[in-house]
Amino acid sequence: MEASAQQTHKALKEAFVSDLSGGDIWEINQVTFTAVSAYALWAALDSRKGVFKNYGVSEFFLEFGINCLGLLLAITLYADNPIALNLALLIPAAILLLTTPDESPRKSKSAKPAATKTQSAENAKRKPFLTAYRGGMMLITTLAILAVDFPLFPRRFAKVETWGTSLMDMGVGSFVFSSGLVSSLPSGSLSVRLRKALRVAGPMLILGGIRCAVTKAIGYQEHVTEYGVHWNFFMTLGFLPPFLAILAPPISVLTPTVSAILIGVVYEYALDKMKLSAWVLTAPRVDVLSQNKEGICSFIGYFAIFLAGLGTGNQIRPRSTATPVQSSRAKLLRTLAFSCVAWSAATYFAIAPRSLYGLDLQVSRRMANLPYILWVLAYNTFFLLFYLGVECLFFTSTPSTASRSYAVPRVLHAINLNGLAIFLLANLLTGLVNMSFNTLEMGRVQSFGVLAGYCGVLATIAILLDARGIRIKL
């Protein structure tokens, strides 16, 4: 009887996240823009009032309220009115910007030339907006993987079944893009490249195998059409470094961005003209290959996203420290603005109906097809541009001394520093919450309380690891 009840509960949870059609791209942008708005308010308080100059418990709670609970509100209680939430964050930020002088750290005019030169080199390497973007992306991803199991989280934000767009569909693509941003093309012989790649990929593949085994053993709810019977997102992440190592020579010649475009176009041709999409969507699961057809095929699209992220990272990260910071920022703004417009135009061309001179293709995260690839790239370059814009508006100068938290919320810095470890912890806590509570029957207040507590645990552990200088490399 108890086993039957467990099976019924599992079926209900699987049905709760199945056969969904997603929502509107514009709404997804509004909801997730809360992360930028929260960053702007934090930046205003830090640069204009020096609120976070002496960081302690009260500063942590304020920062947690702005950056963490702000995002949680955006995907739950304020999901139907994201513009109001964004305005509530942006209006006080704008008032502080316009009425209060900048109190952020400035270069010291009395510093010795040698020290100034060294410090300039250190500061030129820092990209606060990139840290804030990656931390915010990881935060909303970890919030969504648990929130999706609560009725408080709108079904239109959950992953779509096959065709369409949703907040969580963008989350997995952004995770891969963000990983590419801080990666680089490996060098050396094939054996050297593969050896290094497997050292990086090994832990992720092992985690993927463990997750698969554990979910089967305990009967945890699964959405098979997401990645397949055995495949999961850890495996997708784990296979990226080996494939990058194998294909590094041609990618180096073509550049990562061009390679990403070519892979996306060829893959879309295979899906549409060679009937690969029909196999993914309709073929019976009779062997290991067909049982994991979604994970295997979508990996091609994710690899293209990863390469595009790598190419964008090459543009963002400095190759020389000789360029003045303001000149570097101006160049970055132009570069990201161009990338955003280009990828957005390509996305429009891919999904627009033929009557509006488009290709009339549908977005599919399940297959990670070309429209999905382009959408992920347009979205992420758009947000990188706005994160950089906030940094330029509120932090007009560089600090006289190196500061890991300069222009970055400490909690986002901490989450970014141990991103994969926090993501793994979030997955473990998600399983624990789902096994401990009947999330499907929780009310709004109770649901928000559980999610806020979960977010608090993640943020606190990230801060404690950062405070002790611990970086867990997976």
Image: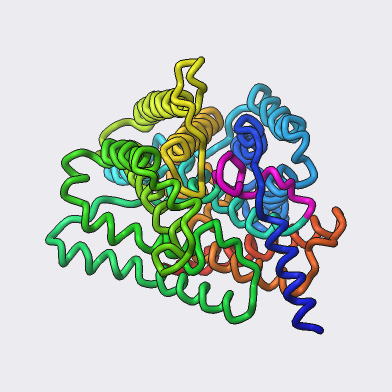
The residue depicted at 74 percent of the width and 46 percent of the height is 154
159 sits left or right of 395 in the view? right
* Quadrant into which the C terminus falls: bottom left
* Quadrant into which the N terminus falls: bottom right
Tell which of 384 and 285 is nearer to you.
285
The residue depicted at 27 percent of the width and 40 percent of the height is 259
Tell which of 472 and 110 is nearer to you.
472
Q: Is residue 431 above or below residue 281?
A: below
**Hey, which residue is sitting farthest left in the picture?**
189
Residue 314 visible to an observer of this rendering: no
Magenta segment, principal secondary structure? loop
Q: Is residue 297 above or below residue 335?
A: below
Q: Is residue 161 magenta?
A: yes
- The location of residue 261, given as percent across then percent down, is 32, 36
The residue depicted at 76 percent of the width and 47 percent of the height is 76
126 sits left or right of 262 in the view? right
Counting labels gives: 0
- The location of residue 303, given as percent across then percent down, is 36, 50
Q: Is residue 225 magenta?
A: no
Region in magenta = 151-170
Tell which of 260 and 445 is nearer to you.
260
- The location of residue 336, given as percent across then percent down, is 41, 29
Q: Is residue 45 above or below residue 451?
A: above
The quadrant where residue 246 appears: bottom left
